[in-house]
Structures are given as structure tokens and as C-alpha cells.
Image: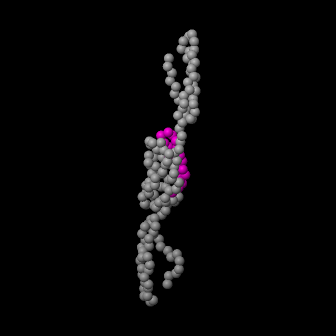
Amino acid sequence: VSYTLSGLVSHGLVKTVSITSSATACASVSTTYTAPVACTVCSLSITTTALAGGTVGQPYSQSIAVTGATPGSLTFAATGTLPAGLSLNAATGVLSGTPTSAGVSSFSVRVTDTRACSAVVPLSVTINCPPITLAPGSLPNGQVGSAYSQTLTASGGNAPYSFSLTGGSLP
């Protein structure tokens, strides 16, 4: 008669199992087996603690760095709200894409290795509006008694633009 032992839970301890066989009508036999159980020590850690900001409409890419991983595959997952237009690659841990709106997004990233060890880190990303540039950078002088006209143009940012006087006064 043979027996297979399976399903011993690994907690770094020695497991003792007793088996009693009563395969014959005359007697039963009892045996105790002691087997050391492998200890799984998790040292997985996410070392990324902050992410660079991004700009609406500009490509963004940041890697989530990990130490103490078991060789083999890692799995990354985000919970919370990622910035619109960005996604986390589950296999590589790269947060990338092109942001579509400005604001601050807070979320957590979890990484899990092949031994089911995991680590979690809270992160946030600030996505800014693209800068607006006005041209010309300075206005030419006018002459007293002469009509004055200068066209101002804007670029960058998100059109349409509106112009207003925010300080001083017109002559």
C-alpha cells in the first residue's frame, strides 16, 4: 500500500503527519513522518516613491522600480484612478500613454512575483496644462498722435484662446 502526501502549507516550520493503515483485517500500522517545509521569504519591494509630472498632449512614460523579486515574471496592477490617457503595463510596470486632461491622480501600484510575494506603494501623478506662449514677446513703441495696432498670437495650450488685460491700462 502506498500513500501520497500533498497540500502541506509552507510557513517555514517542520510538518509532522501520522498515517494509520488498516488495510488488513488483522492489524493496523501507524507511522509518523516528519518533513521540513521550505520557507518562502518575501523581500519584494517597490522602490519608486514618486512619479514625474506630465503635460496634456505630451507622451509620458515612467517605470515602477522593484527590488528583491524572484527571477521570473512579475505582475503589476493599479487600483485607483490613473490619469486619463495613461495605462500601467501589467508585465513591465511601465506607466505610459499621452495624458488627455490636467489634474492630480492618486492610485496604488501592486507588484506580485512568481512566489505570490507582493508589495504595494501609493503614488500620484500631476498632469499639467501645456504652456501658452504669446508673441511678440514685447510690443514696439507707439507714437503720440498716430494710430497703433499690434496683433498678438498665442500658441501651445489648448485652443481656443481668449485675451484680456490683467494689469495696467491702455494709453
Which residue is located at x 56 percent, y 26 percent? 34
Q: Residue 147 in the image: x percent, y percent? A: 42, 85
Q: Residue 8 in the image: x percent, y percent? A: 54, 30
**Depth check, front residue: 17 or 165:** 17
The image shows a total of numbered marks equal to 0
Query: Is 115 within the magenta?
Result: yes
139 is higher (above) or lower (below) than 115: below
24 is higher (above) or lower (below) than 47: above
Which residue is located at x 53 percent, y 38 percent? 40
Q: Residue 25 in the image: x percent, y percent? A: 56, 10
142 on left or right of 28: left
Figure coloring: one colour
**Segment colored magenta:** 106-125
**Depth check, front residue: 16 or 54:** 16
Q: Residue 113 in the image: x percent, y percent? A: 48, 42
- Say if residue 110 shows up in the picture: no
Query: Is 20 within the magenta?
Result: no
Toward the bottom, the furthest residue is 145
Which residue is located at x 53 percent, y 77 percent? 167
Q: Main secondary structure of the magenta part?
A: strand
- Say if residue 166 shows up in the picture: yes
Which residue is located at x 52 percent, y 47 percent? 45
**Depth check, front residue: 84 or 6:** 6
